[in-house]
Image (cartoon, rainbow, N blue to C red):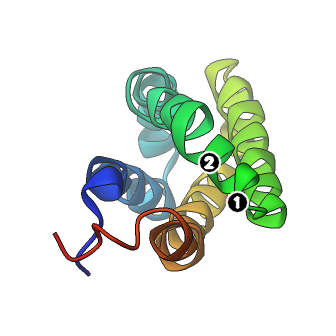
Amino acid sequence: MKRSPALRQLSREHHTALSLALRIAKASDPAAQERLLATVPALFRGELEPHFQEEERSLLPQLADAGETALVARTLDDHAQLRALAAAIAGGDAMALAPFGELLQAHVRFEERELFVVAEQRLFADDAAS
C-alpha cells in the first residue's frame, strides 16, 4: 500500500513490531522464552517506545483535532497496555510474553488498516499519492 510521506516511517517501523510478535508466537520452549525475556525489554525501549512517542506527539493530536477521538483513544489504550506488558516482561514475567505478542500484532494491524487509513483521508489526502 502506498503511504503518505507523513506516515511512511511509522509504517516501516511496524515491520519490526510484527517480526517481534511472530518471534513471540513461535517461542514455545522455555529457552526461547528466556531469550525473549532478555531481548524484548531492549527492543521495546529502543524501537517500540520511540514509535509510540512519535505517534503520541505528532499523529494522534492531529487526529484528535480532526474529531477522530475514538481512534485516538483506542491507540492510546493499546499503547498503555503494551507498556504495562513490556514492564512485566522486563520484570521477568514470562506469562506476559504471549499477551504482549498478540496485542502487538493486533495493534499494528489496527494502525495499518484503520488508524493510518483515516489519517490519510482526514489529514494527508493531498500527499497520499506522492
Q: Amino acid at mark 2?
A: Gln
Considering only vertical position in the picture, is 50 above or below 1? above
**Residue 15 seen in render:** no
Q: How many marks?
A: 2
Q: Percent x, y for residue 18?
A: 40, 60
Q: Is residue 82 left or right of residue 84?
A: left
Q: Residues within 10 Å of mark 2 (few under 14, many from 20)?
A: some
Q: Quadrant of the C terminus?
A: bottom left
Considering only vertical position in the picture, is 101 above or below 39? below
Residue at numbered disc 2: 62
Q: Nearer the viewer, residue 108 or 24?
A: 108
Q: Percent x, y for residue 26?
A: 43, 63
Secondary structure of the residue carrying numbered label 2: helix
Res. 101 image quadrant: bottom right
Q: Nearer the viewer, residue 128 or 81?
A: 128
Residue at numbered disc 1: 66
Q: Percent x, y for residue 122?
A: 56, 70
Q: Which mark is residue 95?
A: none
Q: Is residue 25 left or right of residue 81?
A: left
Residue in view at x 51 percent, y 24 percent: 41
Q: Nearer the viewer, residue 15 or 20?
A: 15
**Residue 8 seen in render:** yes
Q: Is residue 31 left or right of residue 129?
A: right
Q: Nearer the viewer, residue 119 or 97?
A: 119
Q: Amino acid at mark 1?
A: Ala
Q: Residue furthest front?
A: 126
Q: Quadrant of the N terminus?
A: bottom left
Secondary structure of the residue carrying numbered label 1: loop
Residue in view at x 27 percent, y 67 percent: 127
Residue contact at pointers 2 and 1, CB within 8 angstroms: yes
Residue in view at x 49 percent, y 33 percent: 54
